[in-house]
């Protein structure tokens, strides 16, 4: 069991990995394969970080965080998922659009899709040309679909298009092949952690308070005491890096702190519903977009994996404000949107509801990092090691 494996003495570690999310578990695999004596320390009582599959709230697995194998045709997680027997859906992402009164026809949906593809294309062109500008500059304000594009972009990227550089869009490596994991992305990361935990100790519920990298090695202060190693890999979120929760001795150099500041976490939250019957029978899995004047920066994933479920994905300031208001407010907001889309009768069939809470999680602090416009090469600066013993990954 993770967290209960044999412990090495404190002087035996070559590498301390901070964070048991996807990056930390990948590093543990690499350390095992290279014969490096490593330990992973994780503040939460589970592995996965922002990949967490909930098996308790519904009859089916529910991913609170990441769910999709993006760029699945080249993603190194894809063959690992196949080896472990994880299922994913290969069908292209489908959309439906509700205009406030009813669902628009397929031809109009195709028009929106064409505008969306063209807009992302402009973002890629601008980024590839070295123009570090806001993504919003690439949205044609005269387009019939400008408002709806913004509403869909925000939960996908986790921040409004005014707040993210096209560098992030043009460099994301997305091949357009995106497959959601039916058995849960969080469950996949947990399975990969189980594969490695006999060779690399994974210590849970062990928050790190300090990292002293000023001596010959690295000293890491945890609630379990001090750990010593030759090197340390930090995979925590930029929200944690920029907070007082984790202290560095000596302080990180100004250029490193500036890079962190240019990569704040966006906000993305979900509200999942499970129904007693299947109100979406006959509908394929799709995203329902709300083309309303007062439409939210959100979209519903309807009938995921043909299950009697619906999940609201919200992003940006809306997601942040709802999360700060609490799970009841999030669920009430999602219920109101669901009723407007499918009629009030659909609410009678709700059996269970669950809201996520990444914004208020002190060990996460949001969704995923986004590069501020003008942030330049902050991601490369964040990844640059210090003194060849303090390394960074995960964002």
Image (spheres, helix red, strand yellow):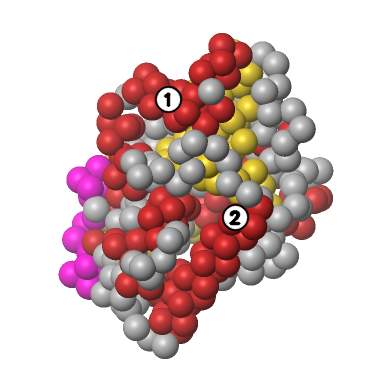
The kind of secondary structure element at disc 2 is helix
Residue 21: x percent and y percent?
51, 47
| 247 magenta-colored | yes
**Dot in front, 1 or 2:** 2
How far is the residue under mark 1 from the one under mark 2?
24 Å
Residue at 57 percent across and 67 percent down: it is 114
Residue 344: x percent and y percent?
51, 18
| 85 magenta-colored | no
**Which residue, given by chain and number where applicable, does mark 2 sit on?**
109
Callout 1 crowding tier (Cα within 10 Å): few <14, some 14–19, many ≥20: few
Viewer-proximal residue, 56 or 220? 56
Q: Are marks 1 and 2 in contact (CB under 8 Å)?
A: no
Q: Is residue 177 left or right of residue 165?
A: right
Above or below residue 393? Residue 85 is: above
Q: Is residue 147 left or right of residue 85?
A: left
Residue at 43 percent across and 53 percent down: it is 148
**Which residue, given by chain and number where applicable, does mark 1 sit on?**
336
């Amino acid at each position: 069991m993770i967290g209960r494996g044999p412990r090495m003495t404190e002087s035996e570690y070559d590498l301390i990995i901070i964070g048991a999310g996807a990056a930390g578990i990948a590093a543990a695999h690499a350390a095992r394969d290279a014969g490096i004596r490593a330990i992973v320390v994780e503040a939460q009582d589970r592995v996965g970080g922002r990949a967490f599959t909930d098996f308790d709230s519904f009859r089916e697995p529910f991913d609170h965080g990441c769910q999709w194998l993006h760029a699945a045709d080249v993603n190194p997680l894809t063959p690992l998922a196949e080896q472990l027997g994880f299922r994913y859906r290969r069908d292209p992402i489908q959309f439906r659009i509700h205009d406030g009164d009813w669902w628009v026809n397929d031809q109009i949906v195709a028009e929106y899709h064409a505008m969306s593809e063209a807009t992302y294309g402009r973002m890629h062109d601008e980024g590839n040309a070295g123009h570090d500008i806001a993504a919003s500059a690439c949205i044609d304000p005269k387009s019939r679909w400008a408002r709806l594009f913004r509403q869909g972009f925000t939960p996908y990227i986790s921040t409004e298009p005014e707040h993210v550089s096209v560098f992030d869009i043009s460099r994301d490596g997305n091949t357009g092949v995106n497959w959601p994991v039916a058995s849960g992305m969080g469950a996949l990361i947990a399975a990969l952690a189980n594969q490695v935990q006999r060779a690399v100790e994974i210590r849970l519920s062990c928050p790190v308070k300090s990292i002293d990298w000023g001596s010959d090695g690295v000293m890491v202060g945890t609630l379990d005491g001090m750990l010593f190693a030759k090197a340390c890999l930090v995979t925590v979120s930029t929200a944690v890096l920029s907070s007082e929760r984790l202290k560095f001795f000596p302080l990180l150099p100004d250029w490193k702190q500036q890079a962190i500041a240019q990569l704040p976490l966006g906000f993305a939250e979900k509200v999942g519903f499970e129904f007693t019957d299947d109100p979406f029978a006959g509908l394929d899995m799709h995203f329902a977009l709300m083309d309303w004047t007062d439409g939210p920066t959100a979209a519903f994933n309807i009938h995921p994996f043909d299950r009697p479920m619906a999940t609201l994905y919200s992003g940006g300031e809306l997601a942040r404000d709802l999360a700060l208001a609490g799970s009841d407010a999030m669920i009430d907001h999602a219920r109101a949107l669901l009723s407007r889309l499918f009629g009030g009768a659909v609410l009678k069939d709700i059996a269970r509801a669950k809201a996520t809470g990444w914004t208020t999680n002190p060990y996460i602090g949001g969704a995923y990092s986004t590069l501020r416009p003008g942030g330049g090469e902050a991601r490369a600066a964040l990844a640059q090691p210090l003194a060849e013993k303090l390394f960074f990954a995960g964002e």
